[in-house]
């Protein structure tokens, strides 16, 4: 439940990395972006970069690559980041607070409109400019503000209960940082982030290649 397969997942995961580099190039006044330069940046073959950009529908220019501004806009449209999405965050602990301080979310079209927590010491405070509301006000505020996505940063023990309540409020998409496989209806979307999974891959690289030899690599198609 809540599992929806997406085609071209490795390419989609690479898009934010391209976008970050392209933003830097734009600020630096670089009018064109070549696939070879971007391939070098992500440590990949240029053919992978070209195939990724084909997904956006944008055509490059022979010999010079893509217009940087056009490529930024094409990637944003492809990812659905060209229009803002209203988001709420539940759980203003260490991880939730760190996410609230991540300034690049605005570049992704993400607008965090509400933050909820059950800790009396956090309720009424501000974290990176976001007011923290009592989780008991969640139903009322969600009915008013209608967020499209909820970010879940609560303890594993209460994550399912919180998500059930949010679904009752009409939320249909979840970015889940709690260490639990959520059970949701078929029409509800869940993207689970397993932080330990990334560390497991790094540990395996160290185990296989040794320190100093395990480099970033492009996720295979």
Image: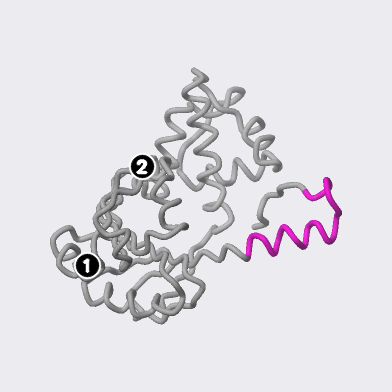
Task: For the residues labelled 2 and 1, say whether their Cβ atoms are less than 8 Å apart.
Answer: no
SS for callout 2: helix
Mark earlier in primary sequence (2, 1):
2
Residue under the point 65% across and 41% down: 42
x then y, percent, for residue 5: 48, 69
Tell me the quarter of the image containing the N terminus: bottom left
Seen in the picture, residue 11 relative to 45 is either above or below; the reply is below
Please tell me which residue lies in front, 8 or 28: 28
Residue at the spot 54% in from the left edge and 53% down from the top edge: 13
- Residue 46: x and y in percent read 67, 38
Secondary-structure class at tag 1: helix
- For the magenta stretch, what is the residue range? 197-214
Query: Is residue 201 highlighted in magenta?
Result: yes
Q: Mark 2 points at which residue?
A: 106
Camera-near label (2 vs 1) is 1
Q: Which residue lies most toward the top here?
A: 29
Given residues 94 and 35, the one toward you in this image is 94
Res 171 → quadrant: bottom left
In the rendered image, residue 199 lying in the magenta stretch gets the answer: yes
Name the chief secondary structure element in magenta: helix
x and y percentages locating residue 99 in the rendered image = 43, 52
Quadrant placement of the C terminus: bottom right
- Give left or right: position of 6 versus 126: right
Instruction: Give the CA separation, mark 2 to mark 1.
Output: 23 Å
Mark 2 crowdedness (10 Å alpha carbons): few <14, some 14-19, many ≥20: few
Q: Is residue 122 above or below residue 102?
A: below
Residue at the image point whose x is 44% and y is 67% from the top: 176
Horizontal arrangement in the rendering, residue 98 relative to residue 144 (left or right) = right
Residue 196 as seen in the image, left or right of residue 20: right
Q: How is the protein colored in the picture?
A: one colour
Residue at the (34%, 66%) spot, across then down: 173
Q: Name the residue under label 1.
A: 138
């Amino acid at each position: 439940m809540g599992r929806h397969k997406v085609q071209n997942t490795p390419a989609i995961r690479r898009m934010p990395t391209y976008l970050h580099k392209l933003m830097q190039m734009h600020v630096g006044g670089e009018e064109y972006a070549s696939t070879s330069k971007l391939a070098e940046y992500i440590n990949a073959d240029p053919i992978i970069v070209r195939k990724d950009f084909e997904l956006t529908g944008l055509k490059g220019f022979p010999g010079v690559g893509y217009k940087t501004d056009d490529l930024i806009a094409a990637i944003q449209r492809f990812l659905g980041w060209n229009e803002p999405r209203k988001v709420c965050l539940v759980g203003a602990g260490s991880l939730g607070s760190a996410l609230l301080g991540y300034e690049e979310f605005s570049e992704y079209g993400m607008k965090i409109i509400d933050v909820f927590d059950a800790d009396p010491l956090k309720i009424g405070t501000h974290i990176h400019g976001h007011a923290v509301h009592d989780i008991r006000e969640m139903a009322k505020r969600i009915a008013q503000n209608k967020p499209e996505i909820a970010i879940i940063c609560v303890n594993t023990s209460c994550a399912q209960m919180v998500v059930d309540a949010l679904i009752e409020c009409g939320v249909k998409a979840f970015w889940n940082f709690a260490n639990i496989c959520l059970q949701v209806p078929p029409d509800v979307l869940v993207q689970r982030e397993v932080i330990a999974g990334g560390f497991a891959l790094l540990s395996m690289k160290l185990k296989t290649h040794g320190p100093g030899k395990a480099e970033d690599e492009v996720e295979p198609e």
